[in-house]
Image: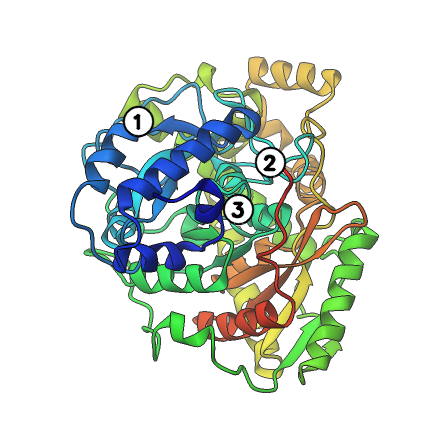
Amino acid sequence: MISVTDYQAHDGLGLAALVARGEVSASELLDAALARAEAVNPRINAIVITMHDEARARAAQPLTGPFAGVPFLIKDIIQDYAGVPTTAGSRAIDYVPDTHAEITARFLASGVVVFGKTSTPELALKGITESRRWGATRNPWDLTRTPGGSSGGAAAAVASGIVPLAGANDGGGSIRIPAACCGLFGLRPSRGRVPLGPRLGEAWEGASSDLVVSRSVRDSAAMLDAIHGADVGAPFEIRPPERPYLDEVGRDPGRLRIAFTTRSPIDTAVDPACVRAVTETATLLQSLGHHVEQAEPEIDGTQLAQDFLTMYMGQVAADIAHWGAVAGAREVDFEPDTRVLGLLGRTLKAGDYVLARRRWNVYARALGRFHQRYALYLTPTLACPPVAIGALELPRWQRAAQHLLLALGAGRLLHGSGIVEQLARESLAKVPFTQLANLTGTPAMSVPLHTTDDGLPIGVQFIAAFGREDLLLRLAGQLERAKPWAQRRPAL
């Protein structure tokens, strides 16, 4: 038997080692996870679909893999589990897949015991997790604050000690944003590193990739070892790593040339706490022997933000149509914000969409040239600490304008009016740093090195060249040893 306190003291690989040595069973670990969930989930609202029967049956079976017997949660979008509803955080969707998504199958092959699904904003569209379907998910560090999004449920579950790591995905920052909000490590792999089949070849035109949020660097590395590689019919296959990613965590990264900035790429405000986190990280890096200097890639951040939003709108329109065809979802049942984005996506000219998509190559080439000079690029993960629950709700007059826009179906009139540019600036003002990695397909991580004066987590982001997850993991391991964060836990 293992107590909840002892259960929380271990990361995923640590728990798997206990099982492998026969000191505890998978069923006992599941009991501890369920007890912790029962104690805290009513307050944080991280787990929205439970799978206790499936989990108990699996825990009773012989399990193999690096995480054999470790309790685990998957995200309620993309990571389909056969026979269990997928809602994508929407009242419009109740879809029961008949097969596992490939990413879920690979999670299971790692030996984890899945006992539920975590919350996401509707269609994973926001950097907060407050859906009308499931309600607000809360940050264990401060229940009045957001855990971030869209993998907010995953991050809240890990930060609160329900599980040591949980499935997540990242199309615009959705692994790194909640990791930063909840004091966790979050690595977004390169485009194509992790499979998304069979329903998808690439999610969000390749901007999105899956992995986990975790308390330890080694858990993320070991899970990437377990799940990476193309599946059957994938659009392309990325070059495999030279050695296991887990081996990289303990390797000396050598003396790296690292660039940093604290300026928002869309020229919006950056909170002093987030600026301080980067400058203090730069000082720490120098003390570890790295060369650090202020520099930025030659990229038009405002144009990149608008091109991200163009893709985002088109994807929403396609998702509404997809769920209507696959699951009978009615457009009227989606949230107003989602419906407005869908309207803008439907009325977007195809040529404009393609031009915006082509510019992703411009950004990737510019970042590639930048990485010829600098191994890594350091920025804030977020432009502010975690915001209050409800802080990003539209005021009443804007909600009324939304309903009028939907009633008139006037999306085409808005293209060229400047509203897309304004929407890009306003919607990304608090999260302007993360989309660069998504559009360029490069790996990036948020590292939980700092806190605000009142104890809220602050993450810093590192972006590497395409395919260089190994370099990120080497540096993350070094930073974790130099300034450990695992002992910092919310008082929840």
Q: CA distance from mark 1 to mark 3?
A: 21 Å
* Residue named by callout 1: 85
**Which numbered disc flags the more N-terminal residue, 2 or 3?**
2
> Is label 3 in a helix, a strand or a loop?
loop
Query: Which mark, residue 128?
Result: 2
Amino acid type indicated by mark 1: Pro
Query: Which mark, residue 251?
Result: none
Place of residue 324 in the rendered image (x, y in percent of width and height, measured from the top left): 34, 23
Horizontal placement of 52 versus 445: left or right?
Answer: left
Q: CA distance from mark 1 to mark 2?
A: 22 Å
Amino acid type indicated by mark 2: Ile
Front-lying residue, 233 or 458: 458
Residue at image x 51%, y 54%?
Answer: 215
| Proximity of marks 1 and 2: CB atoms separated by less than 8 Å | no
> Is label 2 in a helix, a strand or a loop?
loop
Place of residue 200 in the rendered image (x, y in percent of width and height, measured from the top left): 30, 46
Q: Is residue 360 visible?
A: no
**Which numbered disc flags the more N-terminal residue, 1 or 2?**
1
Query: Which mark, residue 174?
Result: 3
Place of residue 392 in the rendered image (x, y in percent of width and height, measured from the top left): 69, 30
Horizontal placement of 194 versus 10: left or right?
Answer: left
